[in-house]
Amino acid sequence: MNFEPYPFEKLNNLLKNITPNPNFTPSTLTIGEPQRDTPAFIQDKLCKDSALLRKYPKTSGEKQLRDAQRLFVEKRFGVELKDEEIIPTFGTREVLFNFPQFLLFDKKEPAIAFTNPFYQIYEGAAIASRAKIVHINMNEANDFKPEIDENALSKCNLVIINSPNNPTASTLSLDELVEWVKLSQKHNFTLINDECYSELYIDEKTPSLLEAAIVANNSEFKNILVVNSISKRSSAPGLRSGFIAGDAEILKEYMKYRTYIGCASPLPLQGAAALAWSDEEHVDVAREMYKENFKIANEILGTKIPKATFYLWLKVKKPQEFTKNLYKKYNVKVLPGEYLARKNSDGINPAKEYIRVALVESPSMIRDALNRIKECLT
């Protein structure tokens, strides 16, 4: 297998010979890792259940976790899932990597489409599946919404979209998601929406592909799946708690596959995760912080406040040179957008003029870092 270096490896190579300005406190705004402490009630539950480490966990997940995740989906999206329509996962990175391999294994000439720019696991999964890759390009002209090419999509077995989007912070409306559901039915491809940033909405709640399926008269979720995670909403990526939900026929066979790959979550993690999925107050606190950070970015850089995520998708001249100068002169790390995308059919990388800035620190730290970015822009 020939995997591309991960974006952060590319960044390390770009900056390896640079000594940052020691007059500034280091600021790392590269990775989408919440910097708020995991809420105390989650940590306390984890400690309380530590004795359960003596037991093997079920691959299918404990009832308390499954119920908590189903209740989350019902409360948040108004969708009542049957037990067979959801599987707890060890975060979502593992499922986004291994599910395509499961789904595409028996296909003679498998093809997978995913948004471009993208979360690099999509590409890795395609490579591991020996699948042809079709990029669903997103660019400034279409407000970074995924372009629909029915001819290309009709030849795909699996399509992955990502709304709210990493890295561009764009969000699809319910009507736009319904259009994608209809395309999956028309061309009979499995459609996944990666919804890991759904809870980091700024004002209005963002829709789920599950909601769109019901609106499109597909209440059985045929060909439709979503993945979601607790990592961003609860500042708890270390809990590794996610789920895949939707088409029960697909999930039935995928559950058999999962019994072999050893991704069962330890029982103390499941108990803490169940508690976190069941609580909304701590998520409200996180949302307010990210909203404040976007307001600060708007004030300092004049950037538009997106509908969701904690990413600033910032257009700059010569992003790689800008990234090096920003690190050297101001001790701030950001990520060149081109590391998160591939060239389209015209040989153009749709992210080549952008950097991604993860607004994951406290508002005071973000204000300081963005002022440094502004200085570097002038």
Image (tube, rainbow, N blue to C red):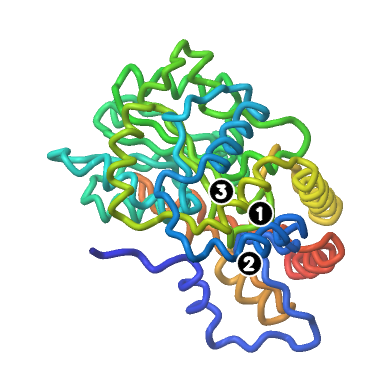
**Circle 1: element type:** strand
Q: Of the residues shown, which amino acid type is indicated by label 2?
A: Val
| The one of 293 and 316 positioned closer to us in this rendering | 293
* Res 314 label: 1
Q: CA distance from mark 2 to mark 3?
A: 14 Å
**Residue 164 screen position, x and y as percent:** 59, 39
**Circle 3: element type:** loop
Residue farthest to the left, as pictured: 108
Q: Are marks 2 and 3 in contact (CB under 8 Å)?
A: no
Q: Are marks 1 and 2 in contact (CB under 8 Å)?
A: yes
Residue farthest to the top, as pictured: 217
In the displayed structure, 6 sits above or below 72; it is below
Question: What is the quadrant of the N terminus in the image?
Answer: bottom left
Q: Nearer the viewer, mark 3 or mark 1?
A: 3
Q: Earlier in the sequence, mark 1 or mark 2?
A: 1
| The one of 336 and 54 positioned closer to us in this rendering | 54
**Residue 125 visible here:** yes
In the displayed structure, 311 sits above or below 144; it is below
Residue identifier under label 2: 334
In the displayed structure, 54 sits above or below 279; it is below
Q: Of the residues shown, which amino acid type is indicated by label 3?
A: Asn
Q: CA distance from mark 1 to mark 2?
A: 10 Å
**Residue 302 visible here:** no
